[in-house]
Image: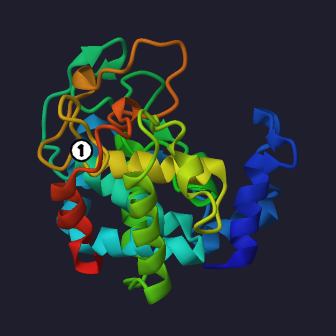
């Protein structure tokens, strides 16, 4: 990864005080061209609903659970959050199938593709989120297309013994979390295990929800079947701090051992 190009991307959207204003987000033309040349920033892309679904299907077919799980593991000691992200996108869309777009409040009722606002998509803010936190829109098809296509350009990653040890400690910490610990508060249980901030740990929890490790008996993850947007029910409270299905998880539910071993059994 070219550090100069990555720094251009990160500084385009983030400052010491947080998100930059919309009008201040583009780098100078020279920096933008440099970041583009390194595959970190991009011109807008045009994709309609059917093209996006076709592309995500093609990308998923080029991957498997072991490959994205290993990248997730390898991110733990390296803090390569772009590697961590792929497990989330792959998990959500591993069972998506071609379908006709059905409009529901300007979104497809099945995949959530936004039917308004034009067909041009800005990938730069999505890639910023990918590197900054490990992604936040894994359940949106445009993000998944970008995430998985960039991931496939990277050399295959293998987790180290340090990565495996970190993961085992995270799982152990989740298993002994106090009763009724919510997914939104779970991050504190493994804060000292590896170098990370709260936002990064929250995304990690969300990804474990997507792949089913932190699903619930009523609200399942995506590893058995694709969950349409209209079925991704959220808790009835003012603030929902986690995406579906992790938003429903509590420590008394526990870890889904089937999906834990399906994705990570080779390191347990």
Note whether 30 is above or below 259 in the view shown: below
Residue 84 can be seen, yes or no: yes
Compared to 3, does 183 lie above or below?
above
Q: Quadrant of the C terminus?
A: bottom left
Residue at position x 38%, y 18% in the image: 235
Q: Quadrant of residue 46?
A: top left
Q: Quadrant location of the N terminus?
A: bottom right
Residue 251: x and y in percent read 38, 40
Q: In the rendered view, does 114 fall on the left or right side of 220? A: right
Q: Is residue 44 visible?
A: no
Q: Residue furthest right?
A: 16
Q: Please state if 2 lies on the left or on the right of 126 as rendered.
A: right
Helix, strand or loop under label 1: helix
* Horizontal side, residue 67 vs residue 133: left or right: left
Q: Is residue 218 above or below residue 177?
A: above
Nearer to me, 37 or 257: 257
Residue at x-position 76% and y-position 52%: 12
Instruction: Depth check: give the residue in front, 215 or 155.
Output: 215
Q: Residues within 10 Å of mark 1 (few under 14, many from 20)?
A: many
């Amino acid at each position: 990864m070219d550090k100069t190009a990555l720094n251009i991307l990160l500084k385009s959207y983030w400052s010491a005080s947080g998100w930059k204003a919309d009008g201040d987000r583009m780098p100078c033309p020279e920096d933008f061209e440099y970041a583009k040349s390194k595959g970190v920033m991009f011109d807008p892309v045009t994709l309609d609903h059917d093209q996006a679904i076709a592309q995500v299907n093609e990308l998923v077919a080029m991957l498997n659970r072991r490959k994205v799980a290993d990248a997730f593991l390898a991110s733990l000691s390296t803090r390569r959050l772009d590697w961590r992200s792929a497990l989330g996108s792959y998990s959500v869309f591993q069972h998506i199938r071609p379908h006709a777009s059905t409009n529901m409040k300007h979104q497809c009722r099945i995949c959530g593709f936004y039917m308004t606002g034009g067909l041009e998509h800005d990938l730069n803010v999505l890639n910023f989120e990918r590197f900054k936190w490990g992604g936040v829109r894994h359940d949106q098809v445009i993000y998944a297309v970008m995430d998985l296509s960039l991931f496939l350009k990277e050399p295959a990653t293998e987790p180290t013994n340090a990565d495996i040890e970190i993961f085992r400690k995270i799982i152990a910490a989740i298993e002994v979390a106090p009763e009724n610990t919510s997914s939104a508060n779970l991050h504190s249980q493994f804060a000292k295990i590896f170098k990370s901030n709260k936002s990064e740990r929250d995304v990690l929890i969300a990804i474990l929800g997507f792949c089913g490790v932190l699903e619930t008996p009523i609200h399942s993850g995506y590893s058995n079947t694709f969950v349409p947007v209209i079925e991704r029910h959220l808790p009835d409270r003012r603030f929902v701090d986690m995406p579906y299905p992790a938003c429903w998880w509590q420590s008394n539910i526990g870890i889904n051992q089937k999906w834990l071993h399906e994705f990570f059994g080779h390191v347990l």
